[in-house]
Image (spheres, rainbow, N blue to C red):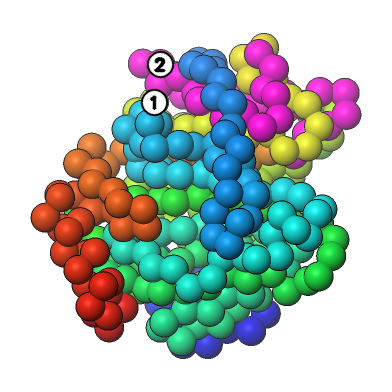
Amino acid sequence: MDTTATTASTSPAGFTAASAAQAPGTGTTPPLTAPRRIERLVAGQATSDGAGVRLTRLLTHDLQRRLDPFLMLDLFGTDNPGDYIGGFPDHPHRGFETITFMLQGRMRHRDSVGNVGLLAPGSVQWMTAGRGVIHSEMPEQQDGAMEGFQLWLNLPAADKLCPPWYRDLAPQDLPRWQGDGVAATVIAGRSHGVEGAVQRPRTEPLYLDLALDAGAAFEQPLPAAHNAFVVLYRGTLQVGGQAVPRGHLAILANTPGSDGVRIDAGADGARAILVAGAPLGEPIAQYGPFVMNTQDELSQAVRDFQSGRLAT
């Protein structure tokens, strides 16, 4: 991993980040008494972004209010270099955070703040665009599979124009919890006594990468008001007795009195991500890579980009 500039553990005001991986957790949580069920399954939409990179958009614009504070989730996955070789050349962001989780392949990041990082399999890139950053994400391979997730997390109005922040997290930097037939990589939030690599006090994101053996089960407490979803990317699983197909977003119901989610792996095991967060309940004004609270703020973001002031 090659990082420079703002890749230290310091974060924008009010944010915290773990400085190193923790040992596997030994914490236990009481069994759930009222686990959530699936509210609906949403099929991902095939699309392309950047310089023609093919991907599946799982969390689309019309789900932003329902899954507040999350704005978008893409799954990119192919072994055809023609589907990803163009990468994502220089493009701007303002007003939110991006979390990129690589499953396969290598991606090079460069940005206007001076950060340079290499995403390898199992690593995570967390970037807070804040008041503005221009960056590129380009593949560092000519063949082989490229696969991963990119999640957009909204920033509260008070933090929309915070200084940009960036951090690469190698696999060994990501805290993990080990259970009976289950391993949870805690990218953000907290699971079974293990603090995640990144914490955000306002949106309180939980981001877990789960590996379940055949027939294993995993339970995660969740506040009933937090919006949450599950995405399966290997094997088979069920939530509340309902199967979750690959390539779908399983939105979990915000049932009053619910206390978490139980995930049961099928006969061939499962790999999945579980994501949850506290809704902001604020207006969303978006134009492509700019996410603000009002149309005036959005127009200002566009003007700042066009005049070269966005990332200064």
Residue 28 in view here: no
Task: State if disc 2 and disc 1 touch (CB < 8 Å).
Answer: yes
- Which secondary structure lies at badge 1? loop
Give the residues in magenta. 242-271
Could you tell me which quadrant the C terminus lies in?
bottom left
Front residue of 143/11: it is 143
Could you tell me which quadrant the N terminus lies in?
bottom right
Quadrant housing residue 60: top left
According to the picture, the residue beneath numbered tag 1 turns out to be 224
- Which secondary structure lies at badge 2? loop
Left/right placement of residue 249 relative to residue 26 reads: left
Q: Amino acid at mark 1?
A: Ala
Residue 263 part of the magenta segment? yes
Q: Amino acid at mark 2?
A: Thr
- The crowding category of the residue bearing disc 2, from other C-alpha atoms within 10 Å (few below 14, some 14 to 19, many at least 20), is some
Vertical side of 208 occupied by 312: above or below: below
Residue 4 in view here: yes
Quadrant housing residue 30: top right
| Cα distance in 3D space between marks 1 and 2 | 6 Å
